[in-house]
Image (tube, grey):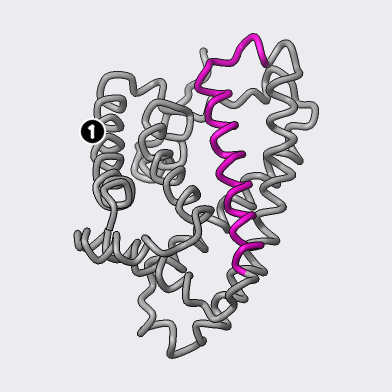
Amino acid sequence: MSFSNTFLFGIYPYIAFFICVIACCIRFEKEPYSWRADSSQMLRKKNMRWASNWFHIGIIFVLCGHIAGLLTPESVYHYVISTEAKQMVAMVTGGAFGLLCFVGLTGLIVRRFTDERIKANSRFSDFLVLILLYVQLILGLSTIVVSTGHLDGSVMVMLANWAQNIVTFNMTEAVANIAPVHWIYKAHVFLGVTLFIVFPFTRLVHIVSAPVWYFGRKYQLVRQKV
């Protein structure tokens, strides 16, 4: 077990999560009004709706699939589906929604980089997030191609075991599970963990800013001037 594997897939995830939590708390406390999506729709609506909708629909299903697929123990899902069938479902649905997300994100990137008005009103972090997500999406779609070489679900189980051991703070087992997998999976996992570090410093924070407190807010009384 090499030190690089131990650090990148055993220690680094905890560093990334710690930075993410602390930085999010500081930003929410110090700059609460920066906690938003910073949509560019008001600057230019052209190509915004279809690209944004396709991207968000795709990314939501991809994220939910990753969470369920990685964190559901093998002993639990075996009640309803086999490992091989689970991998096939993951490849088909992940590929479909991944491609939908890819097309939408491509539209957003072209819009952000070519529209002079939007480009002039963008920060470095806006470009960085799009590029990182694009690379991560390409890596994710590439893993589907690699997965066709082993349809027994063995690699999927190893990746799931890595994630579950990270969550349960069993670093040694986590590293042992991910060490043998193809480098494309490792690159996908590494960049996914890195996004936790980027998260608090970019517009990505709007993912966890659903305005649920509105339901408990008092009604506003609006009176006409007599």
Q: Is residue 170 above or below residue 15?
A: below
Q: What element does badge 1 sit on?
A: helix
Q: Position of residue 154 (x, y in %)?
A: 47, 76
Image location of residue 126, percent across then percent down:
55, 23
Q: Which residue is located at x 54 percent, y 15 percent?
A: 123
Question: Mark 1 highlights which residue?
Answer: 22
User: Percent from the top left, x then y, of residue 112?
Assistant: 68, 23
Is 123 inside the magenta-drawn segment?
yes
Q: Tell me where the magenta segment starts and ends, as one range.
A: 119-147
Taking the image as shown, residue 68 lies to the left or right of residue 110, namely left
Task: Compare residues 57 and 185 and report the one nearer the observer.
Answer: 185
State the residue at coordinates (65%, 9%): 120
User: Residue shown at 34%/44% (left/top)?
Assistant: 216
Q: Seen from this angle, which residue lies furthest right?
A: 46
For the stretch drawn in magenta, what is the main secondary structure?
A: helix
| Residue 173, placed above or below residue 118 | below
Q: x%, y% of residue 34?
A: 41, 21
**Is residue 19 on the magenta stretch?**
no
Query: What residue is rendered at 59% in x and 26% in y?
Result: 39
> In the rendered structure, which amino acid carries the disc numbered 1?
Ile
